[in-house]
Image: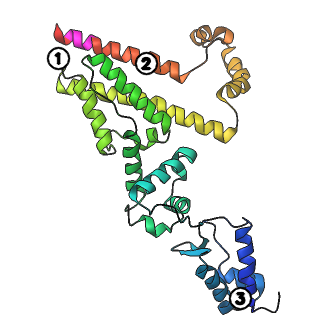
Amino acid sequence: MTNRPPYLAIAAELRRRIRAGELSPGDRVPSTRAVTREWGVAMATATKALAVLRQEGLVRAEPGVGTVVAAAVDPDAAPLSRERLVAAALDLADAEGLGSLTMRRVASALGVSTMTLYRHVPGKAELVRLMADAACGEVPLGPVPADWRTGLERGARWLRGVYARHRWMAHAMASFTRPVATPHAMAYTEWVLRSMRGTPLSHEDKLHAHLLIFAFVQGLSMADDLEERARQDTGISDGEWMEQNEPRFDAIQAGGSYPELATVTEGGGFGLDLEALFEFGLRRTLDGIASMIDETSG
């Protein structure tokens, strides 16, 4: 240490670590106890060192966490609003998944304290609801087609697009008995039901048709999300995984106990493509609804 007061020397070293990137925004800085152990100073000296950094705006107190590195202040940044909060949360969930979304992570991305977020939302559950609503409001559905089949197909593809842009959404909206109530999600349901308005289907059949298509799209989209997580976790593609595990499948089938499975996969020409499965399932589902309409009309 130099001849400067010890607390200034400690503050200078912590300042260096922050500016060198050794401590990033949101990272905890050494606590007063950690400072006393590392530099062999009294608790009062450690407290004064951290106070210097707080006065300089380099660190901030985070309730329940401790002292953390503050994000650099952008003088041109707009003041925090609910819209900015939701947009930052969407970016985080899209990049890292819903499991990585915490109020603290969002606050760090915005360069504010976690407590600041609670002025705009009461908690994570409400934030996720607002995120889902914003995601559903990105692309308008447009006018309801006169033909029911065109409407149901367009609605299914619209929903598939929402889940493709925000893979975490399929899991966030997975409950039928406890659906996420948002204006844009309810507008989608209204749009789909309106597309069947000219059919002879009963109210119950219309609702069941809507929920059937919703469940089908959601199930495939959840599979998309799981596949993406697997690729990120393992670092290998679906094709590479199948190639690695093919000998095991071949060994199980070699006993002859699965003749039908062996027939349809013979030659290795079958590869499961979720997009192809979506097209196949959507056509067959709409065909089934068409048969039901014909039966009702007759």
- At label 1, which amino acid type do we have? Pro
Instruction: Tell me, yes or no, if residue 44 can be seen here.
Output: yes
Residue 7 numbered tag = 3
Quadrant where the image shows the N terminus: bottom right
Residue that appears at 68% across and 9% down = 267
Q: Nearer the viewer, residue 6 or 74?
A: 74
Q: Nearer the viewer, residue 132 or 261?
A: 132
The earlier-in-sequence mark between 3 and 1 is: 3
Callout 2 secondary element: helix
Quadrant where the image shows the C terminus: top left
- Residue marked by disc 2: 281
**Residue 292 covered by magenta stretch:** yes
Badge 2: how crowded within 10 Å, few (<14), some, or many (20+)? some
Callout 1 secondary element: loop
Q: Nearer the viewer, residue 131 or 102?
A: 131
- Residue marked by disc 1: 200
